[in-house]
Amino acid sequence: MKVIIKAEKLCRNYVIPGSEEKKEKEEIPVIKGIDLEVQEGEFVGIMGKSGCGKTTLIKVLGMIDKPTGGTVFFKDMDTKDLWAEELADIRRRELGFVFQDFYLMDSLTIRDNIVLPMVLDKKKAKECLQKGEELAEQFGITHLLKKHPYELSGGEKQRVAICRALINNPDLILADEPTGNLDTKSGEIVVNEFKRVNEELGKTIVMVTHDPKMASNCKRIIFLRDGLILEDLNRETEQEEFYEKILEKMKDL
Amino acid sequence: MSRVIRRIYGIIMGFVIQIICMYRWIPLDGKEATCLEAFLNILRSDNTRSATAAIYERMMADGGGPADDLSVFQFLVFTASLAIVQILGLIYIPFSFFGRGLMFCGVSGLIFCIIPLFSVAELMYMVEDPLQMMCYVGILLIAEAAVFIGSKLIEQLNEASREAKALRERDRAFRKDRKRRLKFKGRYSSLFYHIIGENCSSRWGDYVTFIAAGSIAVSFVIAGFGMWALLKRQELNTILLNFLALSMVISVFLLVNILLFYLKNRMKGYGILLNLGMRRMTLRFYMAVELICCILLSVALGFLLGNGLLFGLKTLLAKSFGVEVISGTLTERTWMLIFISIGVMFVVALVITRDNYYNPETSGAADRAVMAEPIGVKYNILSILTGSAFVCVAIHFFTDRKVGESLLFPGIFLIGCYFLLKSLWGIFLRCKKRMKALSYKNMLTDNYKYYRFKTTFRYMFFLAVMHTVILFVYAKDIAAVATAQKAENLFPYDYVCIADEGDMKEFAKLEKKGFVERKAYPMVRVCSPGQSVIFVSPGEDLINHQHIGVSETTYRKMCEDAGIKPDKFRLSEDGSTVHIIYQQDSAQKAHPINNFLMEDNPFLRVGQPTVIKSGKAATVWITSVKELYPERIVEGEEVSILTGAVSQGAHENIVVFSDTYMEKVMADEAKELVLLNLTSGKARPEVEKTLNAFKERNAEEESYDADVKAYYDKSEIVPRIARERAMNLEVNIFIIVLFMITGFIMLYMKTAAEMEERKKQHTYLALVGMGPKKRHRLIWSEFLSFLVIPFIISTAISAGFLWVTIKLRMFTAAETAAYIKGWGKLYVVYVLIQAAGMLALGYYTVRKVDKE
Ligand SMILES: Nc1ncnc2c1ncn2[C@@H]1O[C@H](COP(=O)(O)OP(=O)(O)OP(=O)(O)O)[C@@H](O)[C@H]1O
Ligand SMILES: [Mg+2]
């Protein structure tokens, strides 16, 4: 098994500019030194209270944000040594990111939004459109393709964002609450698709979620508290049992 | 390469050394021999001591007895070392040919060259020709040193080149690696361009605003330069230059605002594209293309617009004043200047806004647009101090007549205000925020001010400056021109002549014939150094301004004749104190009598102008000027017309001296001030004939300055003044209209830029349960604050400056009243127009927000 992404002593602070009470800038640590390894083909869930730094962590892992301390290795490459253009290439080809606030371009139609990463990778137009259609079909949004993001519901937007993340067949999929806005059924479609991608295609998935039911589909759960890993839980048992275990752990958060 | 050099160098140096060694100078068996030969000879002999001594003794000076052991030994060492040097040199040649041993030969050669030096130090006192010995060793030493240093250098060169090669190789490897790592073959599909196009066209409105505002900025510069180039007339020049400077500043402000507006709207899209893995270079390329297209379109449209503006102004002026007022043309040089300025403006604007697009960060780029702007806390004290200093300096100078109402000081004042108001506004907001109760009550209305501190302040200040400029700089001139005395009333006499004793007969003749009524007063010429420029730069030729000097008695008589109540004053007998009457009308800037080097007191010289040649050191020059032009103290000053405002205050003002002093100076410099009034129009040709003859006789009088004449003709000056005033009025109004359009565009842009945010805010407020009436009131209160606050600031500032102007020009009560009334009318009209504009924007916003 190869390590696809590894974090060493990872830290991320946010800088709050000086206010009238405190003149100096203030640094607030959000991630406080996390060591983490994700093997190829894993399906990892990240859980934790709201505001504990899940989005921050996943953004740093996804190289969208830079760590303020520690190192992130992507496929044994120190991301610090990578050039901006290389990072762009990695983001485009090897990473799929589902943002918590979707991050869709209002100026483009849904279809264009979905195929964007593929188009940016200089793929042929026909190929892109075909792949886009396929994915849209899978997630039941074919009828929305001509619309614009601002005409969509939250759940629909979420599915669009997931389609976009999957279109380039990335090795690593990072998803920030991909089922947060979805009803149980739609959520299940998403998770089942993730499971399929994970099991059949061997893609790695890291998913932030609040829903223990969804989380119980993962093979491994990382619990975050106050910017540190509280517990790294591997699934050895059936899903039902695992679900119980997660519920148990969630009480500690 | 270096190997070849090394080889060639080695061989050449080897031969050089051999040639030196071949020099025969050691006496051996009656003939001269080389060192090597001498040494071999010694070696071959049975007794080394005696053989060496034999040679050495032959070299010694006359009478040098038998050599002692030490000297012989030293000579032996000497010859031996030099022989070794030659042998080493011989070995050196083949070695160098194979490129080896260079260093070894160099070092050993040098050592064996140094050894004989010790011997030479002793031997030179004994031998007959020490110079030859020393030279021989010295030259050899230099040659060996050249070998040594040369080899060292070549080695280094070698190393350097090797390093360079390694570097090149590393560089090449890096580039290759880079090429490999950044390989991104293929071409973007049609879909890519479709998406880029789609993304652009969705923000169509942004481009329209950008291009509209950009072209207006460009057209401003064109209009500013164009007007300046077309109307190169004395009187208008300052107005036009001021306008030019202002239009540049405003254009830059406009451009910065457009760029910020535009970038803010584009940033979110750019951020998403980057996050999805668009190449940074690709993104930058499209950003640049977009920006450059917009800029080019703005310039093109601005070019048309600017030319339209100029054409409009040209026709307007030509229609009202005749074609001849357009005295200049737009040459290629002007156009070059225009385009360079436009380029510079765009570059400055881009540099100011550089942070915003140089690096749209991958994360947070989208947040940037909505991030709160911090209220500055740093440098507050410094800022207040600097601001106050600027304000004080500006007030101090502007209230003094000596700077001649230079607009530099109101400019400095405004810069000071910027610092001062910014910190005060920040402090005020923070204090208000700290008083939580108040803050919560007004949370919604004040929120914006905290949240967008910088933007709010920038716009408020810009509006305040714009109002001030219009209300003070331009409206002031308009009001002054509109309420000034009629030009005819500025001239009580038809002719004003500065005559000599000899001319009086002719004037008497005219009077006798009944053509004119004549008045004559004794006077002297009074000159002052450089008047209307603030800083006379030393080293330049001195400009003289010429005035009329009269005695106290004459002054009283003149006043009596003109029906004016004379001022009361006491002047000193030595002429050190003077009274000054400025002969100018109220529409004119308050000219100082002089402001030589910004000194407080005038420097006035009785007599004809003198030219002090340049080329002297500054201090010498200043001292010599001060010697020639004695400093006088102004006892009193007034603005009234005694002989006529023939030069509008630049020349021919009246300087009153005490009777005693006048009597003294009249001895040498006596002149006659002759004032003529025609008895009837028919007499004019006859009178002018006499005056022309008079003028010819006084050619010298006119030779110093084109503006100073031997006589002044009312019928010529009055229409000129009238026309100047009318033109002044028209140009000022034109400029005001331009400024008002800009101001409105600026506000529109601000409104448009914030529309999205405002819509969101109102949807939110509606959801929280705030009624439409209350929400509208919120919008209105904000628009109102943008109307009222800048107006309060600018009204205060311009009223203050206006008051100073009134004082400087020494208006009478009636003049003051008329002037303030005239200005007040303009003020009201201006406020109404601004309010209407704000109202329109307010309605526009309310409508848009309600649509949501
Ligand atoms: N740009 C920012 N500047 C300052 N602080 C930030 C910023 N973004 C996040 N934070 C802070 O960092 C902490 C972690 O934020 P993060 O978004 O990672 O939380 P989260 O675990 O994803 O929460 P949620 O489950 O609600 O999405 C929060 O306390 C938040 O206030
Ligand atoms: Mg989150």
Image (tube, coloured by chain):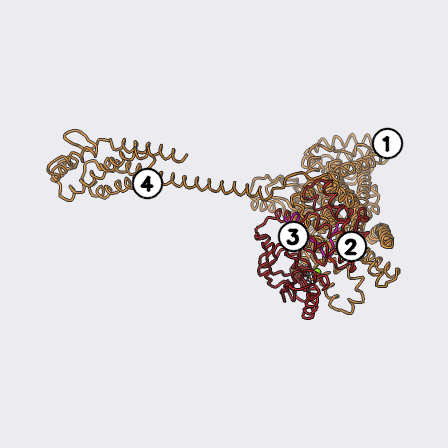
Chain colours: A red, B orange
Q: Nearer the viewer, residue B222 or B442?
A: B442
Which of pointers 1 and 3 indicates the residue nearer the eye?
3
Which numbered disc flags the more N-terminal residue, 2 or 1?
1
Based on the displayed image, in which of its 4 quarters is residue B57 positioned?
top left
Type of the residue with mark 3:
Gly
Q: CA distance from mark 2 to mark 1?
A: 55 Å
Type of the residue with mark 1:
Lys
| Total numbered labels placed on residues in the image | 4
Which numbered disc flags the more N-terminal residue, 2 or 4?
4
Q: Determine whether, in the image, residue B751 is placed left or right of residue B18.
A: right
Above or below, A85 relative to B445: above
Type of the residue with mark 4:
Met
Q: What secondary structure is found at the residue carrying circle 1?
A: helix
Mark 4 Cα within 10 Å, few/some/many (few <14, many 20+)?
some
- Give the number of the disc on residue B461: none
- Give the number of the disc on residue B794: 2
Q: Quadrant of the C terminus of chain B?
A: bottom right
The structure residue drawn at horizontal position 78% and vertical position 29%, both measured from the top left corner, is B689
Mark 3 and mark 4, same subunit?
no
The answer for which chain carries disc 4 is B
Type of the residue with mark 2:
Ser
Mark 1 Cα within 10 Å, few/some/many (few <14, many 20+)?
few
